[in-house]
Image (tube, rainbow, N blue to C red):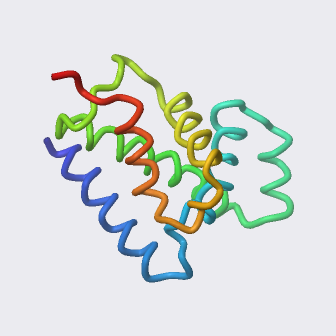
Amino acid sequence: MKRLTLVITFVLVTLCQGQAQDNRGSAKYMLPFCQTWLKVAAERDLEVRGSILKTEQPIRLTTAGMCAGLVVGVAETLRVLEVVCPPEHVSDEPLVRMVIAEIEKHPEQLGEDFIVLASEVIMNSWPCKD
């Protein structure tokens, strides 16, 4: 229960921050960070990681992790609230890939809130059967 409370708090705080600062909560802003997370964390692309560390601030790596955390947090929150019924043992990588792929199919929505779009993707992908 404590973990759920932390996840919900993190999502709400992040959502509020995203709305207050330069549209940092938009899909357009977050997608590159999700893609970086996939390259660095999931694919273990050392070249990309090294490039980021040499040419950019390392904050990009932590922001990439934040993107994955948002997706996982949204999925977990929706699962606990029984809004979605994902397959058992779905890991972070396919979850993040699914959300990215679906959001990229709709470039006209890139200005919209990332968390809202991620929630829609997850709810449409894993509806609970009545």
Rendered view: 79 above or below 60? above
Q: Picture coordinates of residue 13 (x, y %)?
A: 33, 68
Point 34% across, 17% down: residue: 88
Q: Picture coordinates of residue 3 (x, y %)?
A: 23, 43
Rendered view: 14 above or below 129? below
The quadrant of the image that shows the C terminus is top left
Depth check, front residue: 105 or 63 = 105
Rendered view: 90 above or below 95? above
The quadrant of the image that shows the N terminus is top left
Using residue 23 as the reference point, say whether residue 19 is left or right of it.
left
Depth check, front residue: 71 or 57 = 71
Point 57% across, 48% down: residue: 103
Quadrant location of residue 52?
bottom right
Q: Picture coordinates of residue 53 (x, y %)?
A: 78, 56
Depth check, front residue: 54 or 20 = 20
Residue furthest out toward the top: 88
Using residue 86 as the reference point, say whether residue 18 is left or right of it.
right
Point 34% across, 39% down: residue: 123
Using residue 79 as the reference point, say whether residue 109 is left or right of it.
right
Q: How many marks?
A: 0
Q: Picture coordinates of residue 77 (x, y %)?
A: 26, 43
Depth check, front residue: 125 or 32 = 125
Quadrant location of residue 80?
top left
